[in-house]
Image (spheres, coloured by chain):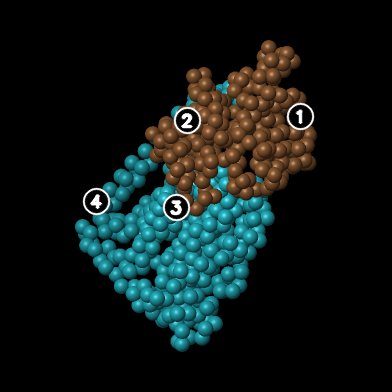
Chain colours: A brown, B cyan
């Protein structure tokens, strides 16, 4: 079943159009990546799904519900989680408070989700009372992911989860994402670390200049001569 | 580019800062030593007695608690909405008038006509002293006055938000600031029109305890104590709200990063509304207890207090609730104790001088970077 369906999406910021006719699907439990050069509009696609850009045409639907222009609160309720690229934790709140905010739309903080997040990211439990802003980049990234997992979403949007991480942490991060996906959450991920991302995902999109350029399985994109040449550094 | 630029800029900053920093610190230390010397010599020569010093400090604490409480309201709206609300001072007056109209009505029912009571004795038609108003003499009237002052300021701030600020949400801070100055004028002259411009006495002389301090008696009256209990109680309440409650955490989250709060699913308009409600209540109540404590009420009381509140809030690190309290107490103490060194006409100026001095040494304010935490 198709979870996320983006059709002919035109979007941008104010008068400035960035995306043109973008099409994109994510199936249930699928792991999809978007790669492409800097400034291609990858983050803009994710923001547009959450209604944070200026909508100029096309539709976004989730679980067969039209969410074009819906407010984030309602989008979250449908089962979508989002970890933006920058500033993705509340630095002045403690780790635990950050996670609690992830479940704000529920009346009570779900104990089982909290335990599950702490089990997935033990470092967060160790640091539960620490202010998020004082943690390392990698730990903040895990916290941001944990926050988005508090509602056990059907689809998780991850914008460059490995950015700024030390090389040994990058692998660990990708492993975590695999685990999350294997536990049944579909993933739509933007990555600079394109080769590794394509190696791990089911399917990939190459986005250039705000438009779809290629779409295929991760393997096929890795093997494609042109894609290698132009987007994966040979 | 970004990183290199930030790096070189911060280098320049680091290189240049120690000089101004240590000059300011040296000037500050020099000034403090001089002031201490003047103080000690006045104490030694008996020009100033220790119990008088105690009285000034107590007076400053009272003033500081009012400024701090009102400052918490200002800081909260600043940290959530990112603009400095200049109509805040007139919310204080509006809260005070609504509360005192209630107090007059309850205390004076049957003893004066309802119109003059509701206008808080406009034009000298009825006097608070003559009605015997006070926490011990008319406790119900005072307690209900406090409650109505809070409710009145909440209603006003929600109304102004709905009609003026909400349509401007998303505009920059300057637009909102200028709009709030307009609101401030409109409110102030509306209050002047309705309640008149005379300063009225609102309370009868409250009973007092006297404490013997070294060389004389320091008087602490019932209204001092009421102010102390109400202000401290509300400050503790705000602290618990921010740290323990779901709403308080959402307020901190929003002041930390509004965009992230939105995509996390925090209903931000709802949080904004609660911010006005809580900030408004604190502000209205601060206006009421200020009038209870000083025993007089005028249409521009809040406006005159506003600059000191801004000084306190900036001093504390704008946006920080705890900074507002600390800044309020520093400013209050300075405004009251300045008469030791300078003529009382300059006391307000002294408060600003202290603000500037502290900001020179600590430009980000006492509690900067803590947001509402
Ligand atoms: N908030 C914004 N306002 C205006 N332009 C923006 C904004 N965010 C991004 N852009 C522009 O949109 C284009 C695509 O940006 P983005 O989606 O962040 O690219 P990517 O994530 O693929 O690197 C870039 O040219 C960028 O400058
Ligand atoms: Mg990006």
Disc assigned to residue B206: none
Q: Residues within 10 Å of mark 4 (few under 14, many from 20)?
A: few
Image position of A145 with respect to B271: above or below: above
Image side of residue B2 versus residue A128, left or right? right
Q: Which residue carries the number 4 mark?
A: B44
Residue A216 x, y percent position in the rendering: 71, 24
Report whether B48 appears left or right of B174. left
The quarter of the rendered structure image containing the C terminus of chain B is top left
Residue B76's place in the image compared with B92, above or below, is: above
Q: Is the residue at mark 4 from the same chain as the one at mark 3?
A: yes
The residue under the point 75% across, 42% down is A59
Dot 1 lies on which element? Answer: strand
Q: Chain letter for mark 3, please.
A: B
Query: Mark 3 and mark 2, same subunit?
Result: no
Residue A193, relative to residue B371: is it above or below? Answer: above
Residue B344 rendering spot, x and y as whole percentages:
42, 58
Query: Residue A211's mark?
Result: 1
Element carrying mark 2: helix
């Amino acid at each position: 079943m198709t979870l996320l369906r983006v059709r002919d999406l035109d979007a941008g910021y104010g008068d400035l159009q960035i995306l043109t006719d973008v099409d994109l699907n994510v199936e249930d439990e699928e792991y999809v990546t978007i790669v492409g050069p800097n400034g291609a509009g990858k983050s803009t696609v994710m923001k547009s799904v959450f209604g944070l850009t200026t909508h100029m045409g096309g539709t976004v639907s989730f679980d067969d519900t039209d969410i074009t222009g819906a407010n984030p609160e309602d989008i979250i309720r449908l089962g979508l989680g989002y970890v933006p690229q920058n500033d993705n934790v509340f630095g002045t709140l403690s780790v635990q408070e950050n996670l609690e905010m992830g479940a704000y739309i529920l009346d009570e903080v779900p104990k089982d989700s909290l335990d599950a997040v702490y089990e997935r990211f033990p470092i967060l439990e160790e640091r539960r009372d620490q202010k998020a802003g004082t943690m390392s980049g990698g730990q903040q990234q895990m916290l941001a992911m944990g926050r988005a997992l508090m509602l056990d979403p059907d689809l998780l949007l991850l914008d460059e989860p490995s950015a700024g991480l030390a090389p040994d942490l990058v692998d660990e991060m990708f492993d975590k994402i695999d685990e999350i996906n294997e536990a049944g959450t579909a993933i739509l991920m933007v990555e600079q670390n394109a080769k590794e991302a394509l190696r791990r995902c089911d399917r990939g999109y190459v986005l250039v200049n705000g438009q779809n350029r290629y779409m295929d399985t991760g393997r096929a994109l890795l093997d494609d001569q042109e894609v290698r040449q132009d987007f994966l550094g040979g | 580019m970004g990183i290199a630029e930030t790096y070189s800029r911060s280098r320049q900053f680091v290189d240049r800062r120690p000089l101004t920093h240590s000059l300011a610190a040296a000037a500050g230390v020099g000034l403090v030593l001089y002031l201490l010397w003047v103080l000690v010599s006045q104490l030694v020569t008996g020009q100033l007695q220790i119990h008088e010093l105690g009285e000034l400090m107590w007076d400053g604490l009272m003033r500081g608690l009012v400024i701090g409480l009102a400052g918490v309201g200002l800081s909260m709206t600043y940290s959530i909405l990112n603009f400095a609300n200049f109509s805040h001072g007139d919310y204080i007056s509006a809260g005070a008038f609504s509360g005192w109209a209630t107090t007059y009505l309850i205390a004076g029912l049957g003893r004066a006509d309802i119109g003059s009571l509701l206008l808080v004795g406009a034009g000298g038609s009825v006097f608070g002293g003559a009605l015997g108003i006070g926490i011990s003499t008319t406790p119900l009237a005072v307690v209900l006055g406090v409650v109505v002052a809070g409710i009145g300021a909440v209603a006003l701030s929600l109304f102004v938000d709905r009609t003026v600020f909400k349509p401007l949400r998303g505009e920059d801070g300057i637009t909102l600031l200028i709009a709030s100055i307009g609101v401030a004028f409109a409110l102030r002259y509306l209050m002047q029109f309705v309640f008149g411009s005379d300063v009225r006495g609102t309370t009868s002389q409250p009973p007092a305890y006297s404490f013997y301090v070294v060389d004389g008696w320091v008087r602490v009256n019932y209204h001092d104590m009421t102010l102390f209990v109400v202000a401290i109680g509300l400050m503790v309440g705000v602290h618990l709200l921010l740290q323990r409650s779901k709403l308080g955490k959402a307020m901190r989250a929003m002041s930390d990063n509004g965009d992230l709060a939105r995509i996390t699913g925090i209903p931000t308009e709802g949080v904004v509304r609660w911010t006005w409600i809580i900030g408004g209540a604190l502000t209205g109540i601060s206006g009421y207890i200020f009038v209870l404590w000083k025993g007089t009420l005028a249409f521009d009381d809040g406006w005159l207090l506003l600059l000191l509140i801004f000084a306190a809030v900036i001093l504390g690190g704008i946006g920080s609730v705890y900074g507002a309290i600390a800044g309020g107490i520093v400013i209050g103490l300075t405004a009251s104790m300045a008469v030791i060194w300078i003529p009382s006409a300059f006391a307000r100026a002294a408060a600003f001088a202290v603000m500037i001095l502290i900001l020179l040494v600590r430009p980000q304010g006492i509690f900067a970077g803590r947001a509402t935490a």
